[in-house]
Amino acid sequence: MDDTRLLDTFLDLVRIDSPSKQEARIATYCKEVLEDAGCHVFIDDSAGLSGSDTGNVIATLPGTAPGKVFIAAHMDNVSPCCGVQPIIESGVVYSDGTTVLGADDKAGIAVAIEAIRTMAESEDPHPTVVALFTVQEEIGMHGSKNLPDDLFAGELTLVCDAEC
């Protein structure tokens, strides 16, 4: 794991405005970063059902070993979350006090992205990894409510916050 890259990703993410129903910019960021890491990425058609400006992001890093692991996080934040200016003091990241930081759940997204990047760069065997980033968790888990019922059936799933 690259601690500097992880922090940089987290800082990028918190600077992207993503209140509930307006997650398209962060979805685009995640899609681009995960495609660069070698994932097949698609954005589902749940936007029409949830009322968001985007659907859920589902990214798959093909495995080099048997098995499948899911990592789930959500893309929206509670307000006030627009115009976040992160400050680092003594190794801790804070907001400047005018907004929330948005670590819920951009920390989960950053960890998922870094885990995928690390596996993609390593020659060590790894299972297929599926990252799922949902919309509208903060206002009722509307993104996860529009996922197929059997998506996680029998699979190991790491949920970085309560969106599934």
Image (cartoon, grey):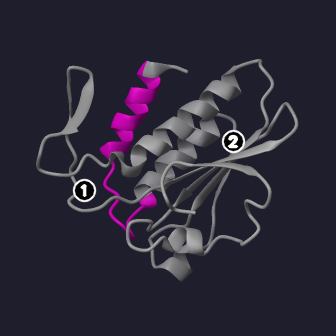
Q: Secondary structure at mark 2?
A: loop
Check disc 2: other Cα within 10 Å, few if <14, some if 14-19, many if 20+. Answer: many
Q: Quadrant of residue 45?
A: bottom right
Q: Secondary structure at mark 1?
A: loop
**In screen coordinates, is 96 left or right of 78?**
left
Residue 36 rendering spot, x and y as whole percentages: 61, 35
The mark found on residue 81 in the picture is 1
For the residue marked with disc 2, what is the amino acid? Cys
| Residue 7 vertical position relative to residue 71 in the rendered view, above or below | above
- For image coordinates 32% across by 44% down, the residue present is 14
Instruction: Name the outermost residue toward the right.
Output: 66
| Residue 41 vertical position relative to residue 55 in the rendered view, above or below | above
Q: Quadrant of residue 9?
A: top left
Quarter of the C terminus within the rendering = bottom right
Magenta stretch contains residue 8: yes
Residue 26 rendering spot, x and y as whole percentages: 43, 52
Magenta stretch contains residue 91: no
| Residue 9 vertical position relative to residue 51 in the rendered view, above or below | above
Front position among marks 2 and 1: 1
- Give the alpha-carbon distance from disc 2 to disc 1, as whole Å: 29 Å
The mark found on residue 159 in the picture is none
**In screen coordinates, is 49 left or right of 12?**
right
According to the picture, the residue beneath numbered tag 2 turns out to be 39
| Mark closest to the chain's N terminus, 2 or 1 | 2
Tags 2 and 1 touching, CB below 8 Å: no
- For image coordinates 49% across by 44% down, the residue present is 109
Magenta range: 4-24
Q: Number of labelled discs?
A: 2
**In screen coordinates, is 122 left or right of 79?**
right
For the residue marked with disc 1, what is the amino acid? Cys
